[in-house]
């Protein structure tokens, strides 16, 4: 994780150094005006926000049970490793992180098809692992954090050491995986003393810009090859229903 975090910091610094656009200003206060999703560049699309819970996806640290009713000697209780995989007899390593339970059942069943006749596989979640969120941008300690219980976006900002004086905390981005792997964004005002209250979910990304939300484009471009497990939806996810 230390290596990933250094890569993210270097990538973010490179992306932000090339951003020369300044935020729109309020005529009355001179402060950056509040932004909306419509202020984002057209090549950085997001789906409409919804609070509907998406299908559960497995994550590193989750404990699962794999059951084959017709070959019980292959049943296993497993913990998803840091590399996102589990190890199964006959099949070997199978990627489990970022897969739904039904998708993983299909993957394992396909693996056993070379050894068993019409294998039936059942996968259940025994215990969820750490709930991780990603906080980046103009904060003191950017990176991936374990949620210490239920927290909101402002508390996540404090978890990362708070916003830097160079930040525009009035126009922060909360990026979330929606139903159907849709990539959603909500603009939040996270200025002290309290900021906007919105409970976070596993896999959320909080991005604090220096000036405008347009910096997200450079951020995504720079971290494309250094995404932590569980956050790939931010780059590869859809932004429109199919």
Image (tube, rainbow, N blue to C red):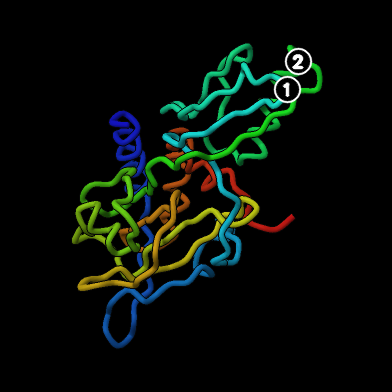
Quadrant in which the C terminus is drawn: bottom right
Q: Quadrant of residue 167?
A: bottom left
Front tag of 1 and 2:
1
Front in this rendered view, residue 61 or 126: 126
Q: Which residue is mark 1?
A: 70
For image coordinates 31% across by 43% down, the residue present is 143
Residue under the image location 54 percent in, 70 percent down? 38
Foreground residue, 193 or 169?
193
The residue singled out by tag 2 in the image is 116
Cβ atoms at labels 1 and 2 below 8 Å apart: yes
Q: How many marks?
A: 2
Quadrant containing the N terminus in the rendered view: top left
Place residue 212 in its image quadrant: bottom left
Q: Position of residue 128 (x, y in %)?
A: 44, 42
Q: Residue furthest right?
A: 117
Q: Position of residue 224 (x, y in %)?
A: 48, 38
The relative height of residue 42 versus residue 94 in the rendered view (above or below) is below
How far apart in space, not on screen, are marks 1 and 2 (Cα)? Answer: 9 Å
| Kind of element beneath mark 1 | loop
Answer few, some or many: residues within 10 Å of disc 1's Cα (few below 14, many 20 plus, some between 14 and 19). some
124 left or right, relative to 145: right
> Which residue is depicted at the point 29% across and 34% down?
6
Q: Residue furthest bottom?
A: 28
Q: Secondary structure at mark 2?
A: loop
Residue lying at 43% horizontally and 39% vertically, measured from the top left: 223
Residue 3 position, x and y percent, is 31, 28
**84 lies above or below 102:** above
């Amino acid at each position: 994780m230390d290596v990933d975090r250094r890569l993210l910091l270097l990538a973010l610094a490179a992306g932000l150094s090339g951003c020369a656009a300044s935020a729109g200003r309020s005529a009355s206060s001179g402060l950056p005006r509040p932004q909306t999703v419509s202020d984002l560049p057209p090549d950085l699309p997001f789906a409409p926000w919804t609070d509907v819970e998406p299908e559960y996806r497995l994550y590193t640290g989750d404990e699962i049970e794999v059951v084959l009713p017709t070959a019980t000697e292959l049943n296993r209780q497993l913990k998803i490793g840091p590399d996102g995989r589990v190890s199964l007899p006959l099949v070997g390593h199978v990627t489990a992180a970022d897969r739904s339970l039904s998708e993983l059942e299909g993957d394992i069943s396909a693996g056993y098809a070379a050894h068993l006749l019409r294998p039936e596989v059942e996968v259940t979640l025994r215990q969820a692992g750490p709930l991780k969120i990603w906080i980046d941008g103009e904060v003191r300690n950017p990176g991936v954090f374990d949620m210490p219980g239920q927290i909101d976006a402002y508390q996540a900002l404090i978890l990362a050491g708070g916003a830097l004086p160079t930040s525009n905390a009035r126009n922060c981005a909360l990026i979330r995986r929606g139903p159907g792997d849709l990539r959603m964004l909500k603009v939040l005002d996270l200025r002290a003393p309290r900021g906007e209250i919105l409970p976070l979910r596993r896999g959320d990304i909080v991005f604090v810009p220096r000036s405008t939300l347009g910096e997200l484009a450079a951020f995504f471009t720079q971290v494309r090859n250094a995404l932590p497990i569980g956050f790939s939806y931010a780059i590869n996810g859809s932004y429109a229903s199919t």
